[in-house]
Amino acid sequence: MAKRLRVSKQVDRFSCLPDELLGHIISFLPVNDVVRASSLSTRWSKVFSLISNLDFQYYYKTQKSESDSFMDFVDRVLQSHTDDVDRFRLMSGKFINSNKVNEWIRYALQNNVKDLDLRLICEEFKGLPDGVFTCTTLVSLKLDLLNKWKYALKLPVKVCLPSLKVLHLSGIEFLDDDSSRRLFSSCSVLEELVVKMRFFVLRQGKFNVCCPSLKKLTIDIACDSFDYEIVIDAPSLVYFSCRYLPRSFLMKNLNSLVEADIDFGLVSDSGDFLFRHNAAGTDLLRGISNVQTLHLSAIFGEVFLKHSTVVPVLPKLTYLDIDGNFLVGWERALPRLLASFPCIEALVLKVKQPSSRDNIDVKLPSETFPSFLWSKLKKLTILSFKGKRMSYIWLSTFWIMLKCWRMSQYKL
């Protein structure tokens, strides 16, 4: 009986699998390796035509001759391919022909692509095929254009992406205010949106995100002119990340928001800029008032207090992570900031002080910490400290006061 149960070592179970399953397995290998394997036998050549993931990477090569070889390689692979495409990923160099890129994208669209990931450095990128914005099978679209200063996203008259759940846009700009609104509102089941822009001048005056299904939103827009408005209406939003502040925020229906990651960016000493910056910050904090976890990167000091006497209250916040540049006056700004978080239980600090400030005295806080802090705060963590000795002593004193209060409560 035992002999019957023994399996011969010569049995090739892998080759016994159906072609469709083999094609799915080898789809996770680099395309170059799959092409080599396809030359082993007629069967492997057939399996190769069934792979569902197509990943073409040509990012670090700079020679035009290498570009020609790469384009020929992609053409050969697509000519041999016969099945649907689950994932199509393309990383192209600057010598890759833009017309070729669009041919490859159209092939993916015609074969019911679900995940389209494009990272392009074409010297003269002529724009995406219109079919990208009407693809009914597309679930994830990631577009990263490193030649961002040359390309503005041109939308067709009809935009409809009924299956799209993930949208990442980097290195593009919208032609006008209506373009962003049209694109995002056409994604009826969108759950994750990431937008990163780097421009000297922003064409649009309003960046509009109105999407009932959206759960995660990241906005990272950096430009010389901050004269634009961000409008967000997302009742299902759970996570929000924002880097750099615009002129103003208009935030609606964010009652589901749980976590936010905010980077206030650099702050100019200009009075007018500072007023607008703090006003935008106030709008932002007021709009995310239901958040429970907040990661905050900013400059803390006198600049934080100017033109803004009241920090909006975040009544549900229990966890606060501050990664900041602590400048002159930070020891007065911190108590005022914490006074707006009446339910805070955990505070994490990462302190950085520029060396040029080392000779400036740190004063004892002119404003006392809120009384509720001693009863609510359960954990204080200083992850890193880069600065002058007196500032560290000040923070250590705060920690000792908190610990002593906890010990006295325990004895009682």
Image (cartoon, grey):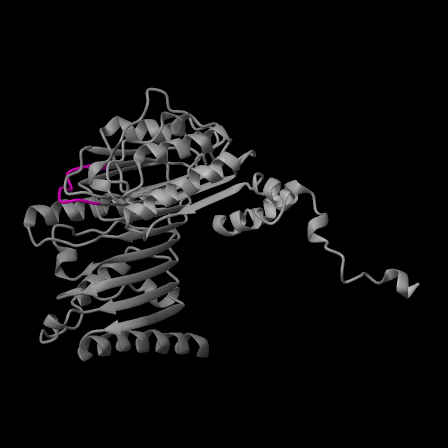
User: Residue 23: percent from the left, percent from the top?
Assistant: 60, 44
Q: Magenta residues, as a range?
A: 222-229
User: Residue 167: percent from the left, percent from the top?
Assistant: 39, 39
Tell me: residue 174, above or below residue 348. Answer: above
Task: Give 215 or 35, whichever is nearer the viewer.
Answer: 35
| Residue 227 painted magenta | yes
Residue 237 in sight in this render: no
User: Residue 379: percent from the left, percent from the top?
Assistant: 39, 69
Quarter that holds the C terminus: bottom left
Residue 401 in sight in this render: yes
Task: Give 122 or 202, whichever is nearer the viewer.
Answer: 122
* Left-right relation of 323 to 269: right
User: Residue 82: percent from the left, percent from the top?
Assistant: 55, 33
* Left-right relation of 279 to 372: left
For the point 28% across and 74% down, which residue is it?
A: 398
| Residue 199 painted magenta | no
Quarter that holds the N terminus: bottom right
Which corner quadrant of the image does residue 219 belong to?
Answer: top left
* Left-right relation of 369 to 301: right
Furthest toward the top, the residue is 157
Task: Give 230 or 335, whichever is nearer the viewer.
Answer: 230
Which corner quadrant of the image does residue 380 belong to?
Answer: bottom left
**How would you classify the magenta stretch by its main secondary structure?**
loop
* Left-right relation of 353 to 132: left
Task: Give 153 or 110, whichever is nearer the viewer.
Answer: 110
Tell me: residue 412, above or below residue 99. Answer: below
For the point 36% across and 25% down, which residue is it?
A: 130
- The count of marks equals 0
